[in-house]
Amino acid sequence: MTKLTLISFPTCPYVQRAVIALKEKKVDFDVVYIDLANKPDWFLAISPLGKVPVLKVERDGHEPAIVFESAVILEYLEETAPGTKLHPEDALERAQHRSWIEFGSQVLGDLWRISTAKDNAELDAARQSLTAKLTRLETIVVGPFFAGERFSAVDAVFAPAFRQIDALETAVDAGLTRDLPRISAWRQALAARPSVREAAPADFADLYLKRLRNNDAHILKLAA
């Protein structure tokens, strides 16, 4: 028997990727939340990078094992967890999906820069970078999900990014996907997916916006 425990932080998009995959595969798991601003010693002892998510794997007859980094956790779950496969069967398609997963991490990087920009120049640069990436994605997405009717790991990776945009746009008319109909439709399809809805706390938007306010995010000042 294997017991899985996910070490988490309520607003971390990388944690949400793992939660979505676990829920898609209908795997039982526990969650332990930590405060990233005050990381406990036991967490630092098991997390080489000091980041979440961390997956603790306990198997009968074995010492507990640690898997870290969201992309690696997704691969471990794909190889070991029963249920729906989140990668294509074809090796080339699988490689392409992994490439777009890395692209998704770059999109999250742009969103981070948007959320931490302190002035118009920083914000404009981050928005331009994000818009360029989403515009490129617009020509790739099949719909309703990334590659068509089948939900994939790429969808699990992008859903938390779109959740951040959803939260941001409750406070400011950012219009980050307004001129991208395929991306907008994909964003809506992901938001309606049960695994995506359940991957973050119900008050995620409030928590996310509170973090931005605490960081004096310039983009929120545009709502005034």
Image: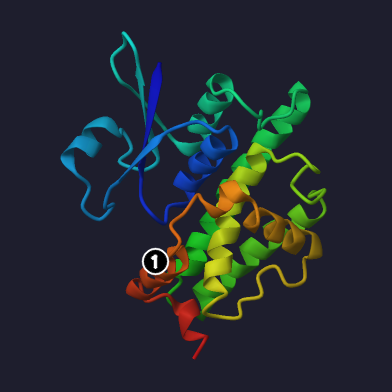
Res 107 quadrant in image: bottom right
Residue drawn at 63 percent across, 38 percent down: 153
Regarding mark 1 in the picture, which secondary structure is present there?
helix
Residue drawn at 49 percent across, 63 percent down: 113
Question: Image height check: is 156 above or below 60?
Answer: below
Question: Image height check: is 218 above or below 201?
Answer: below
* In the image: residue 113, left or right of residue 190: left
* In the image: residue 150, left or right of residue 217: right
Residue drawn at 68 percent across, 30 percent down: 87
Of 74 and 108, the residue lying toward us: 74
Give the color scheme: rainbow, by chain, secondary structure or one colour.
rainbow
Residue at the extreme top = 61
Residue drawn at 58 percent across, 67 percent down: 166
Where residue 115 sits: x, y (%)? 47, 68
Total numbered badges shown on the rendered structure: 1
Res 89 quadrant in image: top right
Work out which quarter of the rendered image holds the N terminus and state it: top left
Where residue 38 sits: x, y (%)? 21, 52
Res 110 quadrant in image: bottom right
Where residue 196 sits: x, y (%)? 57, 50
> In the rendered structure, which amino acid carries the disc numbered 1?
Leu
Residue at the extreme bottom = 224
Question: Image height check: is 2 above or below 8?
Answer: above
Where residue 75 sits: x, y (%)? 55, 27
Q: Circle 1 is placed at which residue position?
A: 207
Q: Residues within 10 Å of mark 1 (few under 14, many from 20)?
A: some
Of 34 and 113, the residue lying toward us: 34
* In the image: residue 27, left or right of residue 134: left
